[in-house]
Image (tube, helix red, strand yellow):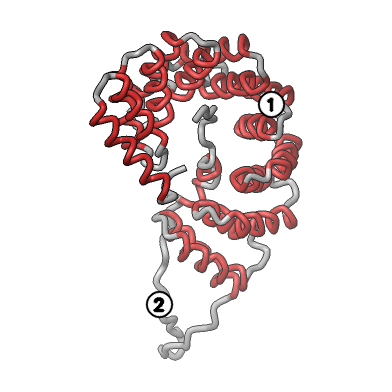
């Protein structure tokens, strides 16, 4: 249950191609062409394949704008049959696959962009996010490094590269990248929060405390900074401070089941059983798969001398466990 949380970044790539995905295109109606000399209608001439490809591509963009990713992908594919070198079609197809969490397909599409345009840093970055979200961090790092080599000012890359380094245990590199991100935007609370997480993973608690505090100076309601600061206080045995920051976390997000659960555990340590039961019950509503909570509630009722209520939760815990439910 002791889960250090980075802010989710899976959605970072989704805004890379906004100008393409949200562009508005006007389609012209084809009209019969009349001959001035004979005043007779000519038959429509065959459409140029590039024109067909362009229309199909634009249809794909419009589908994607409304979240119709299957339809968008189909139109991109049709467009590429006519014009196989349209890197924008591959790029937006990769983005559509990412929206569907189809990482292998996204990777294949984005690699085709880079094959044709090796200096396309947006494609490199998005390919890195695909590998990142798939959990292939070495490949993510490789593509993020390439992105920075092409465009040293690409701020979002430093952010994800720092987290990717942390995921593979390269904490010093992670610190360096996140500090670089902070240089670009000194008031970005999320960067300080994630830097604090890296320091915590590295075992540098003093530095971690400082970074979480910086994040909260910028944004007092930053959920991850509050939660991870609570974890640090928990780790050092400072129950009152831990409770304070877990409480602030759930005030920001009552559905944060991890914070609710740990709040209940700390209330139990302080023998504040009523508060513990409330926290546990809220936690299990947000995360019914954590069946250990039923056992904790039972123990809290037992400590209060309410054996009948305790037995009810112990029985529920036993049934859930025997059925193989939960985690």
Dot 2: what SS? loop
* Secondary structure found at label 1: helix
Residue under the point 73% across and 41% down:
138
Task: Say which of 52 and 224 sits in front.
Answer: 224
Q: Is residue 254 above or below residue 141?
A: above
Question: Is residue 273 toward the left or the right of residue 122 in the image?
Answer: left
Q: Which residue is mark 2?
A: 31
Instruction: Give the vertical position of 44 relative to 139 (above or below).
Output: below
Q: CA distance from mark 1 to mark 2?
A: 60 Å
- For this view, does 13 lie left or right of residue 201? left
Residue at point 42% right, 90% down? 40
**Which one is in front, 189 or 254?**
254
Q: In x, y percent, where is residue 199?
A: 64, 19
What residue is drawn where x is 59% and y is 74%? 49
Which of label 1 and label 2 is nearer to you?
1
Q: Are marks 1 and 2 in contact (CB under 8 Å)?
A: no
Which of pointers 1 and 2 lies earlier in the amino acid sequence?
Answer: 2
Left or right of residue 21: residue 138:
right
């Amino acid at each position: 249950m002791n889960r250090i949380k980075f802010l989710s970044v899976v959605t970072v790539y989704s805004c890379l191609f906004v100008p393409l995905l949200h562009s508005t295109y006007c389609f012209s109606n084809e009209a019969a062409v009349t001959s001035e000399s004979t005043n007779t209608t000519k038959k429509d001439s065959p459409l140029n394949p590039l024109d067909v490809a362009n229309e199909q591509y634009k249809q794909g963009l419009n589908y994607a704008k409304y979240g119709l990713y299957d339809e968008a992908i189909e139109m991109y594919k049709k467009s590429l049959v006519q014009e196989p070198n349209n890197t924008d079609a591959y790029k937006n197809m990769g983005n559509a696959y990412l929206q569907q969490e189809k990482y292998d397909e996204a990777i294949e599409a984005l690699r085709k962009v880079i094959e044709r345009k090796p200096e396309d840093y947006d494609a490199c970055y998005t390919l890195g996010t695909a590998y990142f979200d798939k959990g292939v961090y070495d490949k993510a790092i490789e593509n993020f490094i390439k992105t920075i080599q092409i465009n040293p000012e690409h701020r979002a890359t430093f952010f994800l590269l720092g987290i990717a380094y942390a995921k593979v245990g390269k904490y010093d590199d992670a610190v360096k990248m996140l500090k670089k991100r902070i240089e670009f935007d000194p008031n970005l609370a999320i960067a300080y929060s994630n830097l604090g997480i890296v320091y915590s993973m590295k075992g540098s608690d003093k530095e971690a405390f400082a970074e979480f505090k910086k994040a909260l100076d910028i944004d007092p309601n930053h959920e991850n900074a509050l939660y991870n600061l609570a974890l640090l206080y928990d780790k050092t045995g400072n129950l009152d401070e831990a409770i304070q920051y877990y409480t602030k976390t759930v005030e920001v997000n009552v559905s944060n089941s991890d914070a609710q659960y740990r709040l209940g555990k700390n209330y139990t340590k302080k023998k504040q059983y009523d508060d513990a039961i409330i926290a546990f019950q809220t936690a299990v509503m947000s995360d019914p798969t954590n069946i250990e909570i039923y056992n904790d509630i039972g123990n809290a009722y037992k400590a209060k001398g309410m054996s009948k209520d305790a037995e009810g939760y112990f029985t529920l815990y036993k049934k859930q466990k025997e059925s193989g439910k939960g985690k």
